[in-house]
Amino acid sequence: MQKNKTLKALLAVSTVAALFSAAGVQAQNAVSQTPSQTGTSSTPGKQNTSGKTTREGTIDNSNSTGMENRAKQTGAASPSMGASGGGQSAAGAGAKLSAGDEKILKDIAMADMAEVEGGKMAQSKSQNSDVKAFAQQMIDDHTANLNDVKALAQARGVTLPTEPDAKHKAMAAKLDKMSGDAFDKAYMKEAGVQDHKTVHAKLMAAAKKARDPELKALVEKTEPVVAQQLKSAEQMPMAKAGTKAGK
């Protein structure tokens, strides 16, 4: 009987100990859950902070529009500087011509002036419609070319002659004393054929000698015009009759 009582007492003690042990485990679980919950509540805060960083990073570093704007601002400055540099290059291209180039430009100007003056004289003195048409072509073509020559001369600081040379003045004085068929034949022979042959030969040589690129372009533009004028003059009946030596 006493043994039974002792066993019952031990069982009771074990039961109570087990209960306390279970309660301790639950308490530990509660404690362990609290940091987890606390961590959970702090985690959103961290996520929010991280989220702010992400959003700020997006604004500061990944905004393609902002980068494009900055690129455009940088790029906008470069073209303007390039344009300015181009302007300076163009101004640099306006340096003075060499002595040879200057002579070429002056010779073209002289020829243009002579052809315009001769054309005006033919318009007033000739009664031949073909001669008058040729004379008008000389006025139109050489006035336009002379304007280009003057523009280039101004850009290069070249002073052009203001009147024809002695040779062309003598030709003009001779033609001025003539009239009728005599004038037409002399004008087409001298101004139409001979003068254009001389000018065309000079232009062909100038195309090879000219150093200035704009002068060279002007020469190359003028040469075919003069060649066509020469061809037109040679086809005129009165020019053929009076230019046997020129063939």
Image: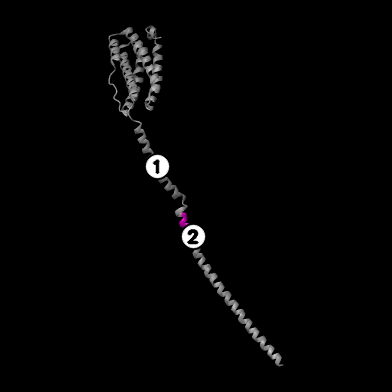
Membership of 56 in magenta stretch:
yes
Work out whether mark 1 precedes mark 2 in sequence or the reverse, and give the earlier one. Answer: 2
- Which portion, as a residue range, is magenta? 53-58
| x, y percent for residue 99 | 33, 24
| x, y percent for residue 110 | 31, 19
- Residue 158 vs 48, above or below: the answer is above
Q: Which of the two discs, 1 and 2, sits closer to the camera?
A: 1
* Residue picked out by circle 1: 78
Residue 210: give its label: none
Of 107 and 242, nearer the camera is: 107
- Residue 63 vs 227, above or below: the answer is below
Of 2 and 186, nearer the camera is: 2
Q: Quadrant of residue 97?
A: top left
Mark 2 and mark 1 in contact (Cβ < 8 Å)?
A: no
Q: Amino acid type of disc 1? A: Ser
* Quadrant that contains the N terminus: bottom right
Q: Residue at x 37, y 40 (%)?
A: 81
| Residue count near mark 1 (Cα–Cα under 10 Å), binned few <14, some 14–19, many ≥20 | few
- Horizontal side of 173 relative to 130 (left or right) equals left
| Residue count near mark 2 (Cα–Cα under 10 Å), binned few <14, some 14–19, many ≥20 | few
- Horizontal side of 24 relative to 218 (left or right) equals right
| x, y percent for residue 92 | 35, 33
* Quadrant that contains the C terminus: top left
> In what element is the residue under mark 2?
helix
> In what element is the residue under mark 1?
helix
Q: Amino acid type of disc 2? A: Gly
* Residue picked out by circle 2: 51
Membership of 10 in magenta stretch:
no
